[in-house]
Amino acid sequence: MTIEAIAALEAGVTTAVSAPHAGTQTTGTFNSLLDSIEQLNGQLQANDQAVQNIALGETDNLHQVMMTMERTRLEFELALQVRNKALEAYQELMRMQV
């Protein structure tokens, strides 16, 4: 598989993921959850770039990069716990007898 084919697949996945969010009318809670996930993803990508800049010697502010990475790690753990609680609630609903 060529790099162009992989890039085309990746572009298709991105379009498929972002299309439902843009075209449907959902509740405010769901939209805020999606926005939070997108923001967390942006922070993770920014952290990757900051670590790369440290490794290349383009920046020397290691302290700030480490603080930002720790903040993002904590936000990721919070998002993971929210997901776990939502999954537990869904499973509890599925176990209820009607």
Image (cartoon, rainbow, N blue to C red):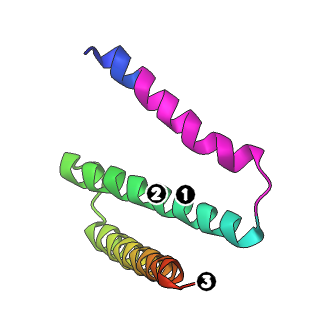
Furthest residue toward front: 98
Furthest residue toward right: 25
Circle 1/circle 2 CB separation < 8 Å: yes
Point out the tag, 3 or 1, that comes first from the N-terminus: 1
Picture quarter with the N terminus: top left
> Is-magenta flag for residue 32?
no
Expressed as whole percent of the image width and height from the top left, the position of residue 29 reads 70, 73
The residue under the point 54% across, 81% down is 93
Amino acid at pointer 2: Asn
- For label 1, the SS is helix
**Residue that badge 1 annotates:** 38
**Residue that badge 2 annotates:** 41
Expressed as whole percent of the image width and height from the top left, the position of residue 21 reads 67, 50
Furthest residue toward left: 55
Residue in the foreground of this view, choosing between 65 and 19: 19
Amino acid at pointer 3: Val
Amino acid at pointer 1: Glu
Residue 78's place in the image compared with 66, above or below, is below
Graded by Cα atoms within 10 Å as few (under 14), some (14 to 19) or many (20 or more), the crowding at tag 2 reads some
**Residue that badge 3 annotates:** 98
Q: Quadrant of residue 34?
A: bottom right
> Is-magenta flag for residue 15?
yes
